[in-house]
Amino acid sequence: MTQTPKLESLTEESLSRGLMVLANLDSDLARILETLGTPPIWSREPGFATLLCIILEQQVSVAAARAVFSRLSGVIVTLTPENFLTLDDVQLKGIGFSRQKILYCRGLAQSIATGQLDLTKLETMEEAAIRTELKRLKGIGDWTVDIYLLMALQRPDVFPKGDLAIAIAFQKLKNLATRPTPAQLEEITQHWRPWRAVAARLLWHYYLGLTNSP
């Protein structure tokens, strides 16, 4: 029986290699690296808890989403799909879930608990297949898939073109009059392949530098 080849994941070593390539390709990215240093790798553990947390982060601040996730973790010590499904709407709303997020997260939990979705299998699948598989679920779109691919599965060439912080950082970095649309970002970052996930980390690094500066 042949083993499925393990797809390349980003490591500290390949992150450094990608940063060198990008710095040679784009002087603005090189400037971020020079002034702010190496960005964090920002890895997350693959699985249900991480995907649920990313759903909570949709269209809200990371701090707000993390507060809800922290309260959930206080109620359910071992966050499994089965344990999540024991909570009713009143309990979830008390934790801070919106009605929409209850629907999305419960749908995710049910799909895993019933065996319709196997998150472990995703780890050895190609990006397009993962995207198709996850987007079957209500409430999971490209941004959620991108963040899961980029942070949990550590794929090196994923670019979350719909991420607001990335768009703001890119506009500022390139001194653009208007914020680029997701379609524009997708097109103008093609030359960063196959290291777009590394470029995304640099842009987040830059964005955090902007928002934390006095």
Image (cartoon, rainbow, N blue to C red):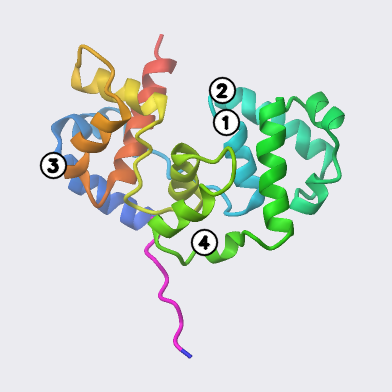
Q: Is residue 194 shown to the viewer in this render?
A: yes
Q: Nearer the viewer, mark 2 or mark 3?
A: 2
- Residue located 82% across and 49% down the image: 83
Query: What kind of residue is marked 4?
Result: Leu
Marks 1 and 2 close (CB-CB < 8 Å): yes
Q: Which residues are magenta?
A: 2-10
Image mark for residue 122: 4
Magenta region's main secondary structure? loop
Q: Mark 3 or 4 closer to N-term? A: 3
Counting residues from the N terminus, which is met first, the one under dot 4 or under dot 2?
2
Which is more N-terminal, label 1 or label 3?
3
Residue at (34%, 38%) from the top-left corner?
200
The mark nearer the N terminus, 4 or 1, is: 1
Q: Helix, strand, or loop for circle 3?
A: helix
The residue most toward the bottom is 1
Image position, residue 144 (x, y; %)? 50, 40
At which x and y percent is residue 207?
37, 24
